[in-house]
Every structure is written in structure tokens, then in C-alpha cells.
Image (cartoon, rainbow, N blue to C red):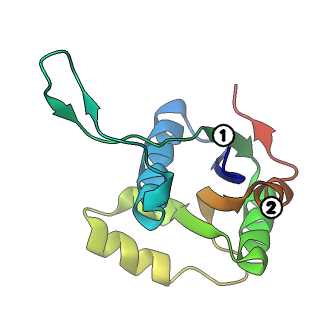
Amino acid sequence: MNGLKTAIIVLETLPTWQKLNVTAFLATGIGDASPNAMGEIYHDAADRPFTRLFGEPIVIFTAPQGTLVHALNQALTRDLTRAAYVDAMFFQPNGEAGRAVFRREPLDAPNLVGLALRGPRNEVNGATKGARLHT
């Protein structure tokens, strides 16, 4: 184990399809920001290559809005790698529009629906305190 941990927290009231969608988007953000979290390329029996996957587990949590905002504040204080998804991004036609609505979110209370964090295990554990393991 490398002492690092990745956790994704999704808003507990989202429909399942949105939880899965947000989780997928956030995981790509952590993979992009943390190439060392990625494992090696996979090859099938015919030696055809398949992309790398995360080389470590990702823990998925659910939480109410307040816990998401608290986790974000903890992540900022602890300088954790982070990816965030806000509610307004669901209604945007593309990434450019999504980034624009993200930029307009209030700093003190963004309307978070998902947050991914990566960093030292104990720091991520502290930031995700209060979130529940997704079942």
C-alpha cells in the first residue's frame, strides 16, 4: 500500500443513475490529476491493449449536502487532490458550459452533488468523516 487513498462522496438524495454518472466523472478527474494512481495497461489473450485502470481501490460514500460542503472545506484545508461536481452541471450541454456554471458557484456554499478526494489516507479519512459507505 502506498499510504494514499481515493474517496468519492455523492449526494445521498440523487437517483442511482446520477450517482453513477457523477462517480464516473469524478473518478476521471482524480485519474487525470494523479497519474501515479493508475495501474499498468491490460492485455487480453490476443495481446490487444486495454487502458489502465486505477491501481488502488476507490471508496464510494454518500452524504447529505452539509457533509459534502464540510468535506470540501476539509480537502481545501488539507490540500488534497479534489474533483467536484455541482448540481447545475447536470443541465449543461458540454464541458465548457459546465465549467462556467461551476465557476459561478458561491465559495462558501457550493451546491455540491459529488466530491472526489485523493491524498494521504489519514487526511482523506478526516475529510470524509460523517459520510457513509455507499451500499
Q: Nearer the viewer, residue 118 or 67?
A: 118
SS type, badge 1: strand
Count numbered badges in the picture.
2
Q: Is residue 12 visible?
A: no
- 113 displayed left or right of 62: left
Could you say where residue 134 lies in the image, as x and y percent from the top left? 70, 32
Q: Which residue is mark 1?
A: 59
Q: Nearer the viewer, residue 52 or 89?
A: 52
Q: Where, by quadrant of the figure, is residue 78 drawn?
A: bottom right
Crowding at mark 1 (Cα within 10 Å: few <14, some 14-19, many 20+):
some
Could you say where residue 132 lies in the image, as x and y percent from the top left? 80, 39
SS type, badge 2: helix
The residue positioned 59% from the left and 67% from the top of the image is: 82
Task: Name the amino acid type tagged 1.
Answer: Val
- 75 displayed left or right of 101: right
Q: Is residue 16 visible?
A: yes
